[in-house]
């Protein structure tokens, strides 16, 4: 009989993760193959599609700007929705984040509650929230504002709380030792120490909200998304192209503006 | 009359480490007391107990006759200023704002939400800054200052509280010798001129001997010496700096050499 | 008479600092100007509270148990789409990331071109691309995966490039000094250093894509989103609640897992619970 190779339990642990790289890669590829199989994605369709794709996209080559002023009006609503949503999120996160920072929260129960609330807000996709708010409030940008606000408040609150947790413990103690109470510690030791990071997060969320606001219209929550949805459904490629260009240009402008602002801050 | 009295205080941390193993001490008003001991002796914990940054697991702390508890923490802290080894300033705020945080206990949270202070607070802060000789740096950001200057801002913050006691936790451990000297002289002067009781944690025997009225020696959570600097003998120093696990302690010999 | 105390800010002149005032005023003005646009109406908000409550009340009905198997299938499909799209994007964005990193790119013109391409790709949200791809290749998971992968390349390529740009130059020089070629320098000198960052990025994007994938069905691009919007439109509350719970659970689980993994990679320690 062949002597079986015995491995002592200590070396059963992977000595170096890199040694297992080929194994992981193989497992990953196998998994991907399974997924492709399961999703019934056929590469023939895809290849066929690619050939067609060039023809398909050529239909977008003549954007029709006859209704540009209406598009710009819609884009304005979209931007306003994003702004209001971001401010809403900022206000909510401003009050929730200090409670959700482990080293600041005055009561463990408040910490847990704030954390779970933030997690919940984050886990609900904003389009799902928008659907719910549209059902309750009717069509219009207001449900969009609430959806963006609630969802991104979860993100901002988590980012802020994590930043507040990274602040040196001594800074909090320095202010605590003077007899400051919880709100004062937050205002004088917490926020000033993370102001730059926090501003970066807010800009990032604003950026993200502009993108999301431009699709919220698809579920009836106002803005340019509904128009795009309709023109695409009606195979009106010229107007769709014009709408996509309006959205694209706006987002790129915001992108550059916020990048510029971030550079100036640091 | 004693301004601080510690009554058989003990402190055990959640991880089981017992930092303070029953200490009883009275600190006279207007005195300059140095708590001396090796690192890990529990000096810091003892000081933090007096400011309520830690709560004792047993015994009690009394300041001007009042027992330190959860309900009067804010009021008690406002009359006990604290100075830290790492200065613990809010680096992004200006020097003046850092000093103004010393006034927070007297202000409601609503005003603090908008960073509002009263004019009289500003005057107190300016006065405290003048006292530590940093008037010209008032509008600098705190992190732009040198270590010695930052520590002086820390002292100004404590002074702005208009405290009865200033506790200084290793105030010179992160400073060069010249700055250390200046800070100790400043603390001594505050004690002499303003009549503020000063309690300083130190591990340098020479500084303790030169500045203190009274020295409390600590080793592994217990008081092993309590007397005037003159009474500090090589034998008592040995008791203070003794370590259980190490027989021939080079640190001890070093400390004794400087004594 | 005692001095009348006046409030002041801790500044030279007692007034709040100009940049802070300017930004607050700008934001408030912008909000004030757009009140009518976003139709913010307190009366409507308050009035809708009862509607919200009744809606919430509707949600809490006995779930439709017969629907559960289909829910699981759809949820699995959503996860599979997320995974596949992220993997495709990973393979595409690794080389793109190298080309878009200032210190690894073969030429500055290529660097600029790839950077601009990446920012174009991530400019529009997945849902817009899903709409476009649905009208190009028809309903199903394929347009969803394409849309996800497309946008993800834009983000991932940028993040990869940024982590390559901050690698320690000395280690790269070390590899170069041993006579490594252009390609070897990048594979052995740069990628290993940027690897922890990469893994963090991939986890973050996996997280993001899962959220996005749950709603792609809204436009017919596969996943749980279609069932979600249908049960909403048809007032099938006994399906809506299980769907919402399932999304919440899966998103939260991945979120926790990626948080743990990221902090373990970044700090090299076990994450806080």
Image (spheres, coloured by chain):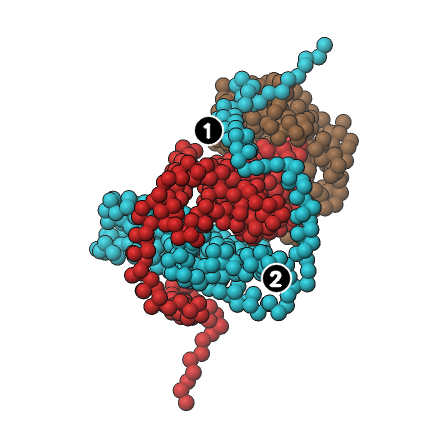
Chain colours: A red, B brown, C cyan
Would you call the spot at circle 2 few (<14 residues within 10 Å), some (14-19), or many (20 or more)?
Answer: many
Where residue C66 sits in the image (x, y, percent)? 62, 69
Compared across the picture, whether A156 is left or right of A36 comes to right
Distance between the alpha carbons at the discs numbered 2 and 1: 60 Å
> In terms of depth relative to the viewer, which is nearer, C270 or B158?
C270
Whether residue A240 is situated above or below residue B205 in the rendered picture = below
Whether residue A171 is situated above or below residue C181 in the rendered picture = above
> Mark 2 = which residue?
C239
Please tell me which residue is depicted at 37% across the width and 58% down the height of the picture.
C136
Mark 2 chain? C
Quadrant where the N terminus of chain C is found in the figure: top right
> Mark 1 = which residue?
B144
Dot 2: element: helix
Where residue B47 sits in the image (x, y, percent)? 65, 37
Please tell me which residue is depicted at 57% across the width and 37% down the height of the picture.
C39
Of all residues, the one furthest to the top in this rendering is C1
Dot 1: element: helix
Task: Report if residue B170 is visible in the image.
Answer: no
Please tell me which residue is depicted at 60% across the width and 49% down the height of the picture.
A135
Answer with the quarter of the image where residue B60 lies: top right
């Amino acid at each position: 009989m062949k002597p079986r190779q015995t491995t002592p339990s200590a070396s059963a642990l992977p000595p170096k993760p890199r040694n297992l790289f080929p194994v992981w890669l193989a497992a990953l590829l196998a998994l991907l193959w399974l997924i492709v199989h399961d999703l019934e994605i056929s590469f023939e369709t895809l290849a066929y599609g690619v050939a067609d794709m060039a023809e398909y996209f050529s239909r977008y080559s003549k954007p029709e700007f006859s209704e540009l002023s209406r598009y710009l009006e819609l884009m304005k609503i979209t931007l306003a929705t994003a702004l209001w949503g971001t401010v809403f999120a900022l206000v909510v996160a401003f009050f929730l984040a200090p409670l959700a920072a482990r080293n600041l929260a005055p009561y463990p129960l408040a910490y847990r509650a704030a954390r779970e609330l933030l997690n919940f807000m984050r886990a609900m996709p904003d389009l799902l929230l928008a659907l719910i708010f549209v059902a309750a409030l009717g069509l219009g940008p207001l449900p969009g504002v609430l959806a963006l606000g609630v969802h991104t408040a979860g993100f901002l609150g988590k980012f802020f709380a994590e930043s507040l947790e990274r602040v040196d413990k001594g800074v909090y103690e320095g202010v605590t030792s003077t007899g400051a109470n919880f709100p004062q510690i937050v205002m004088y030791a917490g926020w000033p120490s993370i102001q730059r990071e926090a501003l970066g997060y807010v800009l990032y969320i604003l950026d993200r909200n502009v993108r999301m606001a431009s699709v919220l219209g698809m579920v009836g929550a106002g803005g340019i998304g509904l128009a795009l949805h309709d023109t695409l459904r009606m195979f009106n490629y010229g107007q769709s192209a014009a709408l996509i260009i309006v959205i694209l240009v706006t987002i790129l402008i915001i992108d550059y503006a916020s990048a510029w602002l971030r550079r100036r801050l640091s | 009359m004693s301004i601080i009295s510690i009554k058989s205080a003990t402190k055990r941390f959640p991880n089981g480490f017992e930092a303070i193993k029953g200490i009883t001490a009275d600190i006279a008003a207007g005195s300059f007391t140095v708590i001396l001991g090796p690192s890990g002796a529990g000096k810091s914990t003892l000081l933090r107990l007096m400011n309520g940054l830690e709560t004792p697991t047993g015994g009690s702390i009394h300041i001007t006759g009042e027992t330190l508890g959860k309900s009067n923490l804010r009021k008690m802290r406002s009359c006990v200023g604290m100075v830290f080894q790492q200065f613990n300033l809010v680096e992004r705020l200006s020097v003046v704002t850092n000093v103004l945080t010393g006034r927070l206990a007297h202000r409601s949270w609503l005003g603090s939400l908008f960073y509002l202070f009263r004019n009289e607070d500003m005057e107190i802060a300016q006065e405290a800054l003048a006292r530590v000789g940093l008037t010209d740096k008032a509008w600098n950001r705190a992190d732009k200052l040198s270590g010695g200057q930052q520590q002086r801002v820390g002292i100004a913050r404590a002074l702005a509280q208009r405290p009865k006691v200033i506790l200084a936790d290793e105030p010179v451990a992160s400073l060069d010798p010249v700055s250390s000297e200046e800070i100790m002289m400043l603390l001594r002067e505050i004690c002499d001129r303003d009549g503020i009781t000063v309690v300083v944690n130190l591990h340098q025997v020479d500084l303790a001997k030169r500045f203190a009225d009274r020295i409390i020696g600590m080793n592994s959570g217990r008081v092993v010496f309590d007397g005037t600097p003159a009474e500090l003998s090589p034998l008592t120093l040995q008791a203070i700096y003794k370590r259980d696990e190490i027989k021939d302690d080079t640190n001890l010999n070093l400390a004794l050499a400087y004594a | 008479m005692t001095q009348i105390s006046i409030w002041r800010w801790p500044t030279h002149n007692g007034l709040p600092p100009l940049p802070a005032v300017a930004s607050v005023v700008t934001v408030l003005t912008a909000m004030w100007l757009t009140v009518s646009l976003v139709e913010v109406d307190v009366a409507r908000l308050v009035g809708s509270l009862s509607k919200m409550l009744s809606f919430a009340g509707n949600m809490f009905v006995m779930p439709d148990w017969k629907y559960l198997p289909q829910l699981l299938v759809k949820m699995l499909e959503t996860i599979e789409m997320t995974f596949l799209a992220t993997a495709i994007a990973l393979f595409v964005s690794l080389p793109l990331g190298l080309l878009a990193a200032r210190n690894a790119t073969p030429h500055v013109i290529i660097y600029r071109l790839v950077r601009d391409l990446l920012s174009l790709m991530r400019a529009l949200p997945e849902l817009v691309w899903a709409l476009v791809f649905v009208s190009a290749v028809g309903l199903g998971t394929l347009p969803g995966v394409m849309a996800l992968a497309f946008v993800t390349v834009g983000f991932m390529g940028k993040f990869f490039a940024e982590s390559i740009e901050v690698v320690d130059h000395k280690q790269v020089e070390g590899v170069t000094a041993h006579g490594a070629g252009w390609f070897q320098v990048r594979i052995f000198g740069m990628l290993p250093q940027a690897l922890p960052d990469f893994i963090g990025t991939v986890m973050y994007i996996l997280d993001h894509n899962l959220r996005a994938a749950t709603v792609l069905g809204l436009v017919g691009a596969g996943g749980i989103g279609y069932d979600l919007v249908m049960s909403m439109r048809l007032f099938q509350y006994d399906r809506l609640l299980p769907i919402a719970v399932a999304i919440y659970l899966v998103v939260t689980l991945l979120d926790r897992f990626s948080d743990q993994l990221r902090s373990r990679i970044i700090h090299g320690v076990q994450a806080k619970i």
